[in-house]
Amino acid sequence: MASADDDSKVPANGLAAGPVDGRQSARALEIARGVSRLLRDLGNATVTELVLADWRRADVVALSRTGEIAIVEVKSSVEDFRGDTKWPDYRQWCDRLYFAVATEFPRELLPVETGLIVADRYGAEILREAPVTPLAGARRKAVTLRCAHAAALRLQGLWDREGAS
C-alpha cells in the first residue's frame, strides 16, 4: 500500500539520493549533493527530499551518530530564497537548521539565526554553525523513524527496481 509520502521512487540522474519530482533545479540538486557529501564526511547519514509529518519536504535531513537531527534548506537563487516563507517551520523538526547556497549567493540575505553552508556538486563547507535547539524525545523518535523508513524504501528500490511501484 503506497502512501502520500512514499519515497520508493529512485532518481535515474545520480545527483540526488532521494526522489526527483521536477521541483528541484539542477543547481539545487548539485548543492544538495555537495551538502550530503560534507555531512557524510562528518559522520552523518543523510536523506534528501524527506516528507515530514506536516507534509513539508525537507531538502536534506542529517542524522548524527548521537541522534542529533539537522535540516538543511537548499537555496539555489535569491528568488528561491525570497519566495520561501516556510523555512521557519522546519525548526520544529530538527536540532539544527542550516541554509545551503552556492558560493556566489549573497550571504547577507540569509538569517543569522541559522547555520550557513556553501556548496557545489563536489562538496561543501560550513561557514556558520547552526544554534542547537534540542528536540523533545517523541519528536526525535518520529523524525528518526521517518528517515529510516524513507532510506530503507530507497535502498529497496535500488536493489529491486522491477518491484518498485
Image: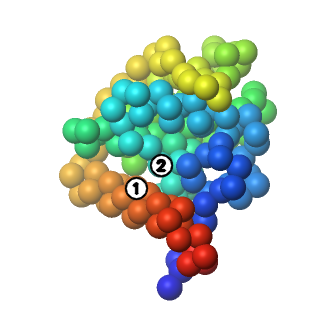
Quarter of the image that includes the C terminus: bottom right
Identify the residue under disc 1: 147
Identify the amino acid type marked 1.
Cys
Q: Is residue 110 left or right of residue 62?
A: right
The answer to which quarter of the image holds residue 30 is top right
Image coords of residue 109 (percent x, y) = 65, 20
Identify the residue under disc 2: 47
Circle number at residue 19: none
Q: Nearer the viewer, residue 52 or 82?
A: 52
Do the numbered discs 2 and 1 sit on residues whose CB atoms are within 8 Å? yes
Q: Residues within 10 Å of mark 1 (few under 14, many from 20)?
A: many
* Residue 133 appears in the rendering: yes
Q: Is residue 47 left or right of residue 77?
A: left
Q: Eyeballing the image, is 14 above or below 22?
A: above
Q: State which tag comes first along the sequence, 2 or 1.
A: 2
Q: Nearer the viewer, residue 30 or 59?
A: 30
Q: Residues within 10 Å of mark 2 (few under 14, many from 20)?
A: many
Q: Eyeballing the image, is 37 above or below 67?
A: above
Image coords of residue 2 (percent x, y) = 53, 80
| Rendered residue at 51%/18% (across/down) | 125
Image coords of residue 7 (percent x, y) = 54, 65
Secondary structure of the residue carrying tag 2 is: strand
